[in-house]
Image: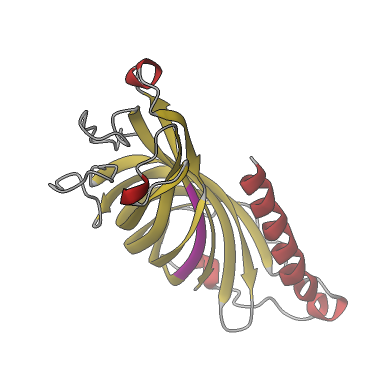
């Protein structure tokens, strides 16, 4: 949970820096920025994010039967998100939104403690196997927003997503040192965000958590880095900023 705590600290720091000029005395005396923004039927924006991801996994019963791999751990890694936002207003407090173009770049990894490392093949007693990913994600989210307070508004969201990994290697034929993963995944998401209204745009920092529900592992009993693992699910925390 340390990575989640770090993200919360970053979020609250950014919120403090963003909200201070908006709630100053001079700002409160002025008219609202973009007063008609929330009444528009559609909103569009550009989203840039930083994600922290890892694999949640279950060990295969074979892990206890063999002693070549002593420990398997999932290693946290950092990636980036690039997306185009489309938000459809449903009422004063509800909207539905999606990202028709959402690219997610990550590099997850497993760390193995090996009893008999193959040193000529580049293995060590502690060996890390990285899994690079370039995913196209299509989310569908329901958003609930608070009343607007000056030039500030908070919201919560929840939804589902489908994900296609362009770099997944389930079909690889020469994969002795790899962990094979399937290309398609689906899952659920939840998050919280803040709208800050400036004279010419709306800036939205958002913290979101994603849970992959499908088993991504294409297990190969002949691969020593794969056969000790049963199920693999993706977990992601994303801190993003959207400009509308």
Q: Give whichever of 209, 129 is nearer the camera.
A: 129
**Figure check: 44 above or below 106:** below
Locate residue 213: give its quadrant: top left
Instruction: Give the colour scheme shown.
Output: secondary structure
Q: Is residue 101 visible?
A: yes
Left or right of residue 107, residue 191 in this image: right
**Figure check: 22 above or below 75:** below
Quarter of the rendering occupied by the N terminus = top right
Locate residue 9: give its quadrant: bottom right
**Residue drawn at x 34%, y 46% as measured from the top left:** 161
Is residue 52 found inside the magenta-colored segment of the image? yes
Measured as percent of width and height from the top left, residue 54 is found at: 47, 45
Magenta highlight: main SS: strand
Q: Give whichever of 76, 199 is nearer the camera.
A: 76
Farthest-out residue, bottom:
200
Locate residue 55: give its quadrant: top left
**Residue drawn at x 37%, y 39% as measured from the top left:** 187
Farthest-out residue, front:
120
Q: Give whichever of 232, 141 is nearer the camera.
A: 232
Measured as percent of width and height from the top left, residue 196 is found at: 64, 69
Q: How many marks?
A: 0
Left or right of residue 19, residue 142 in this image: left
Give the residues in magenta. 47-53
Left or right of residue 133, residue 3 in this image: right
**Residue drawn at x 59%, y 63% as measured from the top left:** 205
**Residue drawn at x 79%, y 71% as measured from the top left:** 20
Measured as percent of width and height from the top left, residue 69 is found at: 41, 30
Measured as percent of width and height from the top left, residue 110 is found at: 43, 43
Left or right of residue 78, residue 196 in this image: right
């Amino acid at each position: 949970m340390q990575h989640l705590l770090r993200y919360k600290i970053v979020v609250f720091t950014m919120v403090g820096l963003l909200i201070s000029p908006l709630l100053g005395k001079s700002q409160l005396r002025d008219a609202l920025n973009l007063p008609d923004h929330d009444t528009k039927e559609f909103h569009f924006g550009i989203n840039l994010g930083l994600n922290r991801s890892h694999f949640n996994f279950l060990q295969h019963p074979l892990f206890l039967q063999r002693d070549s791999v002593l420990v398997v751990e999932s290693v946290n890694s950092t990636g980036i998100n690039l997306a185009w936002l489309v938000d459809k207003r449903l009422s004063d407090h509800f909207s539905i939104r999606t990202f028709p173009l959402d690219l997610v770049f990550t590099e997850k990894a497993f760390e193995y403690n090996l009893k008999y490392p193959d040193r000529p093949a580049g293995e060590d007693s502690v060996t890390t196997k990285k899994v690079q990913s370039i995913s196209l994600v299509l989310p569908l989210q329901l958003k609930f927003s608070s009343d607007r307070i000056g030039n500030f508004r908070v919201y919560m969201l929840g939804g589902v997503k489908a994900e296609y990994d362009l770099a997944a290697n389930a079909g690889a034929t020469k994969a002795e040192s790899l962990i094979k993963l399937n290309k398609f995944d689906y899952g659920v998401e939840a998050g919280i965000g803040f709208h800050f209204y400036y004279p010419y745009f709306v800036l939205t920092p958002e913290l979101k958590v994603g849970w992959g529900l499908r088993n991504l592992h294409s297990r190969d009993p002949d691969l020593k880095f794969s056969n000790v693992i049963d199920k693999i699910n993706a977990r992601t925390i994303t801190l993003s900023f959207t400009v509308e």
